[in-house]
Image: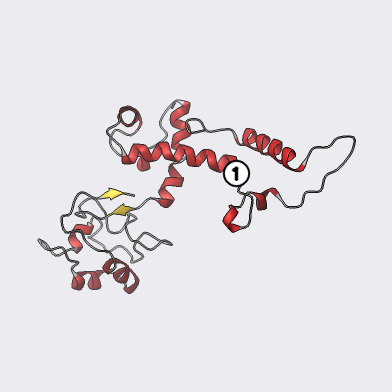
Amino acid sequence: MSVFLLPVSFAEEIQRMLNSFWWGSKKNNQRYIHWLSWDRLSIRKENGGIGFRDLYGFNLAMLGRQGWSFISSPDTLASRIFKARYFPRGDFLTAQLGHNPIFVWKSIWSSRSLLQIGCRWKIGDGTKINTWNDPWLRETNNFRVQTSMISGMESLRVAELMIPGRKQWDVDLINELLNARDTCEILKIPLQENPVTDTRI
């Protein structure tokens, strides 16, 4: 499950088998009562369920771990091989499926949209992060700025919102360019004393 994407029908068949095991199966025309739906049983224990896994979702999560390793550990042999073959001029999050891909790549690539939802940038020096398009704010509901992109400033980097040579935000510039919500969220982000390169988290 951490390498291959299971067909949806196969995952559903396994879940039916688990369901039959849990609730009992028909024998001698005897019917068993299903006290709760499978959806309710799949809820995490702390939220009132039993914690059974949705197999298809779990499969995608396991594949997502492989995709994340391409992002977080780009120097491993596997990452370098897949990068050379499928995304030589970009990264995993911008990779295309490509022509005639192997099934392992097709499986891992299917988790890309899952990673795009939860992935954001951790600010270092701010040089890699596009202010308008990249997810870099800390608000859990929306990692991106909401202010409309300003014409002529499409490639504005987060580094340009900082005071050069100092570990501080340029508050006047941020107020001028961005709306109140974005300004508030940006000013909550602490800047590192010794900035390193920006990293995805």
Position of 36 compared to 1: left or right?
right
Residue 164 seen from this side: yes
Image coordinates for residue 144, horizontal then vertical, percent: 36, 60
* Quadrant of res 180: bottom left
Residue 36, x across and y down, in percent: 73, 52
Q: Callout 1: helix, strand or loop? A: loop
As displayed, is residue 195 above or below residue 88?
below
Q: Nearer the viewer, residue 155 or 92?
A: 92
Q: Residue at x 38, y 41 (%)?
A: 68
Tag 1: residue type? Answer: Asp
Q: Who is closer to the viewer here, 200 or 176?
A: 200
**Residue at the location (15% across, 63% down)?**
167
Lateral position of residue 32 relative to residue 48, left or right: right
- Residue 117 is left or right of residue 48, and the answer is left
Name the quadrant containing residue 72. Answer: top left
Q: How is the image coloured?
A: secondary structure
Q: Residue at x 11, y 62 (%)?
A: 164
Asked whether residue 110 is in view, the answer is no
138 in relation to 84, above or below: below
User: In this figure, which residue is indicated by the disc labeled 1?
Assistant: 54
Q: Splitting the image into 4 quarters, where does residue 90 fall? A: top left
* Side (left or right) of 142 relative to 25: left
Give how far across and how far down residue 170 sits, in percent: 18, 68
Q: Nearer the viewer, residue 82 or 97?
A: 82
Name the residue nearer the viewer: 130 or 43.
43
